[in-house]
Image: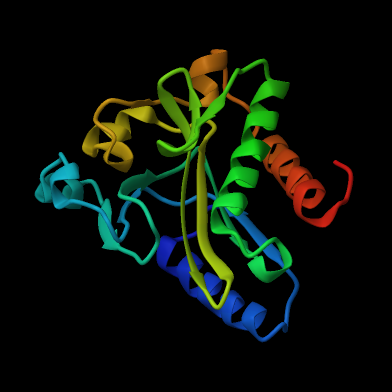
Amino acid sequence: MGNMAYDEALQLQEGLQSARIRDGIPDTLLLLEHPPIITMGRRASPANILAPRIVLERLGVRVVDINRGGDVTYHGPGQLVGYPIFDLKRHGRDIHLFLERLEDIFIRILARYGIQAHRESGRHTGVFAGTDKIVAFGISVRQWVTLHGFAFNVNTDLSHFDWIVPCGLEDRGVTSMKKLLGYPVPMGQVMEEVAALFQEVFAGVPA
């Protein structure tokens, strides 16, 4: 869906979530990028925003409070953001299982590029390469239908994470496919791989 303003994407998500609750649409996955923005989840601490607000405003970077789980995160160009609007009644009625399936998708994709990634079961949600997070997750659920989703650092400008304590994890860094591989990865290619694996994992369609 290209580079879409955060507010526009949120409004679209909320409309699709209501439609999914009514069973008016099938499970739907939105894939896009955002202009630079910082979002604060329900458990976010203001202390985890390190850059002065006046500096962020000068750079055109907004800080918004949202109703997903998790702490503070950054979205920006070069980062693949995905919003699965899924009915979990059809996927085990288990939020933790849903998140584990998302983690598995990205671990498999990264393995295709020779990147060894892992989850930290029982500790931190997300996908890590070494001690650095490469995919962050944060969702909310209404009547078993999901909202919000994941942020996958493909070619992200990692210096922008200096503005925050990403996900509130002071003992973890962030990384990207570009940093680990030493070259940028075509975003369209990654989007196709993510979409195909979502179909395989959640709809049984071979990737």
Query: Which residue occupies the foreground of this view, 31 or 100?
Result: 100
Give the number of marks: 0
**Which quadrant of the figure contains the N terminus?**
bottom right
How are the residues colored?
rainbow
> Measured from the top left, where is residue 177 in percent x and y?
55, 24
Q: Residue 117 in the image: state x and y as whole percent.
A: 57, 23
Residue 166: x, y in percent? 31, 38
Q: Residue at x 81, y 47 (%)?
A: 200
At x 26%, y 52%, the residue is 60
The C terminus appears in which quarter of the rendering? top right
The quadrant where residue 174 appears: top left
Q: Is residue 87 visible?
A: no
In the displayed structure, 14 sits above or below 6; it is below
Image side of residue 53 versus residue 80, left or right? left
Q: Which percent across, then down, holds residue 23? A: 72, 82
109 or 102, nearer to the observer: 102
> Left of 170 or right of it: where is 177?
right
Front-most of 99 and 200? Answer: 99
Q: Quadrant of residue 19?
A: bottom right
Determine the residue positioned at 76% across, 54% down.
202
Residue placed most toward the observer, 179 or 172: 172
Q: Residue at x 68, y 61 (%)?
A: 92
* Above or below, comparing residue 160 to residue 129 in the picture: below
Determine whether 35 is above or below 26 in the image: above
Rendered position, 170 above or below 95: above
